[in-house]
Image (cartoon, coloured by chain):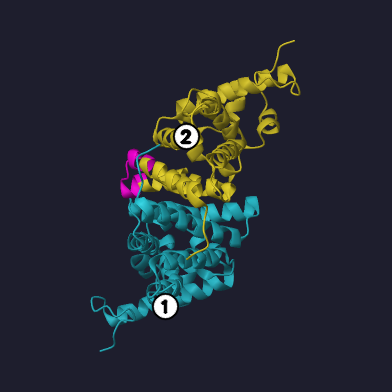
Chain colours: A cyan, B yellow
Amino acid sequence: MTRAPDGSTGERADAARNRARLLEVAARLVAERGAEHVTMHEVAEAAGVGKGTLFRRFGDRDGLLLALLAEAEAEFQEAYTSGPPPLGPGAPARDRLEAFGRALIERNTADADPGAALGRRLPHARRHTSDTARALHRHVSTLLRETGVDGDHDMLAHALLAFVNFETADHLRNEHQVPAARLQSTWVDLVRRVSRAGEAHGISEES
Amino acid sequence: MTRAPDGSTGERADAARNRARLLEVAARLVAERGAEHVTMHEVAEAAGVGKGTLFRRFGDRDGLLLALLAEAEAEFQEAYTSGPPPLGPGAPARDRLEAFGRALIERNTADADPGAALGRRLPHARRHTSDTARALHRHVSTLLRETGVDGDHDMLAHALLAFVNFETADHLRNEHQVPAARLQSTWVDLVRRVSRAGEAHGISEES
């Protein structure tokens, strides 16, 4: 029996193959025309399936784009979860955190990056509740904890990520002509400030 | 001769009065029906002017909402620029910064606040290039400098504000059930971490 590409046993292999093929067709159309010009109808037609199949599988158009985004993000996720250090395991947590932000900013500011291009097309609320967003947040939150930061890791991770999301980063690049390198050094600065205070003495209550 | 309400001498008094009246009419309609249900046509009709006048004055519908937002924000701006400490002048810069974030979060998470309601209706890019957004950023950046933070005040201010903008704060409240009080204590924590590291020894280059 063929195994599903993601190694899951819950999803039957042929269903997984069909899903992969639909995503492949959708990715090709998106690459050719841009995400904003691709309809569910066109994807269904190009894949030779009914539109109903596509909707059952992905819920709606944003659901399909989210699934494409997850595919495009898989490589980046692989790099930060199991690639070489300092992005992957093996380096000190703070180095990994710095490398993570640098890499994320590089990816999000590379206009040709398929993950970035897709991410921008999705409504903020939809994108930020995706598995991809949750994985990014969990990674930053875990590294903050491993760095020894004494504080609300969950919220601090949200705060750091708010600085590098598309809304903030695109705004700073487009309206304030901030180059990616300056975003990256601010990320590194923030990480050091956040983790240094925690390392030294936590947050004291003196004003 | 009557003085324009904002004290400017460049804008003729009657033009300023007309503008104020248009905003008053628009604010009333927005309060009655919600910003999303008010058209330029209705505002013009209720004010007894041509639609052309409205467009000449405010550019477009978002321009009108931005002008309303500026009015709604004037009170908050007054409080942080010249109200009593610690929000206004007279307290140490770091206390003012902490008070500012607490007040901004309180305002932005109060669902009935007219400024917050209007702000949410405006597209991110439009809102963030407004005079209101610029004033908030300038205030945070200036206080960081006064606190003695050694770093890129401009970018650090953007980073702090990214955590409390509507996208981030609404997402955390709606999707993660984070209460306003936790956003506020994270703000205070961030301000202390950012300013403490700067106070102590700047950012060293050790990894």
| Magenta range | B173-184
Whether residue B125 can be seen here: yes
Q: Is residue B86 magenta?
A: no
Task: Say what secondary structure mark 2 lies in.
Answer: helix
Residue at image coords 68%, 21%: B16
- Residues A55 and B166: in front is B166
Residue A58 at x, y percent in the picture: 37, 66
* Residue at x 51% of width, y 57% of height: A189
Q: Which mark is residue B100?
A: 2
The chain under label 2 reads B
Q: Position of residue B177 (x, y in %)?
A: 30, 46
Q: Give the residue type that dot 2 points to.
A: Phe
Assign the magenta stretch its main secondary structure: helix
Is residue A35 something one can see in this rendering? no
Mark 1: secondary structure:
loop
Which residue type does callout 1 highlight? Gly
Instruction: Assign the N terminus of chain B to one quadrant of the image.
Output: top right
Residues packed near mark 2 inside 10 Å, few (<14), some (14 to 19) or many (20 plus): many
Give the residue displayed 57% in from the left and 44% down from the top.
Answer: B128
| Left or right of residue A165, residue A89 in this image | left
- The numbered dot on residue A83 is 1
What's the CA distance linking mark 2 and mark 1? 42 Å
The relative height of residue B168 versus residue B132 in the rendered view (above or below) is below
| Vertical arrangement, residue B44 with respect to residue A123, above or below | above
Compare residues B9 and B16 and report the one nearer the observer.
B9
Rendered view: B1 above or below B72:
above
**Coordinates of residue A22 in the picture (x, y in percent):** 42, 75
